[in-house]
Image: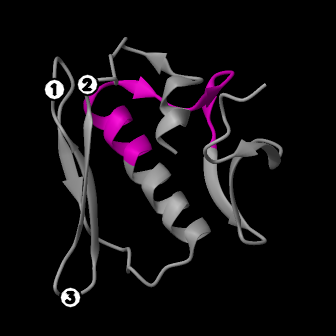
Amino acid sequence: MARDLECLRFGREVNLSPLVWEFEITPQYCVIIGWAGAKGIGGFGRGDGMSMDSTYPDAAVWVAETVQTELAGYEFVQWPSHGKHLLKPSAHSNVARWIDPHDNTVVADIGSLCLP
């Protein structure tokens, strides 16, 4: 999913290369994900709604939605943007994918957005 951050961004220019991802599992087995702020981009951490027992597709969708919300809400970046609207992360048949919400077509698997 992190490599998808380089593709289909619209809005304020941000350099994502200095970000340091943070990952934690609490004693209650809840997952916390975020990144430390660096060089003009704010940090965040979120831990609601994801269990360490989640499937890969569900976890990938949760991470994508969390990052999408943080970028749009605090950095004024629309990501990933296909045309003038955001793609939606979705889990289908044990695969996490980016979906165009206007016609429900699959744009790419999560993690493969930049691939030709």
Q: Indicate the colouring scheme.
A: one colour
Residue 23 as seen in the image, left or right of residue 104: left
Q: CA distance from mark 3 to mark 2?
A: 30 Å
Q: CA distance from mark 2 to mark 1?
A: 6 Å
Q: Position of residue 16 (x, y in %)?
A: 34, 24
* Residue under the point 53% across and 59% down: 60
Q: Position of residue 106 (x, y in %)?
A: 80, 46
Q: Position of residue 44 (x, y in %)?
A: 19, 46
Residue under numbered circle 2: 18
Residue under numbered circle 3: 28
Q: Residues within 10 Å of mark 3 (few under 14, many from 20)?
A: few
Is residue 17 located in the magenta-colored stretch of the structure?
no
Can residue 101 be seen in this snapshot? no
Q: Amino acid at mark 1?
A: Ala
Q: Amino acid at mark 3?
A: Gln
For this rendering, which residue is in front, 83 or 39?
39
* Residue under the point 56% across and 32% down: 80
Q: Nearer the N terminus, badge 3 or badge 2? A: 2
Q: Position of residue 22 (x, y in %)?
A: 23, 52
Locate residue 84: give its quadrant.
Answer: top right
The reply to whether dot 2 and dot 1 touch (C-beta < 8 Å) is yes
* Residue under the point 43% across and 42% down: 68
Locate residue 92: give its quadrant.
Answer: bottom right
Q: Is residue 6 above or below residue 108?
A: above
Residue under numbered circle 1: 38
Where disc 2 sits, the SS reads loop
Tell me where the magenta segment starts and ends, as one range.
67-87
Where disc 3 sits, the SS reads loop
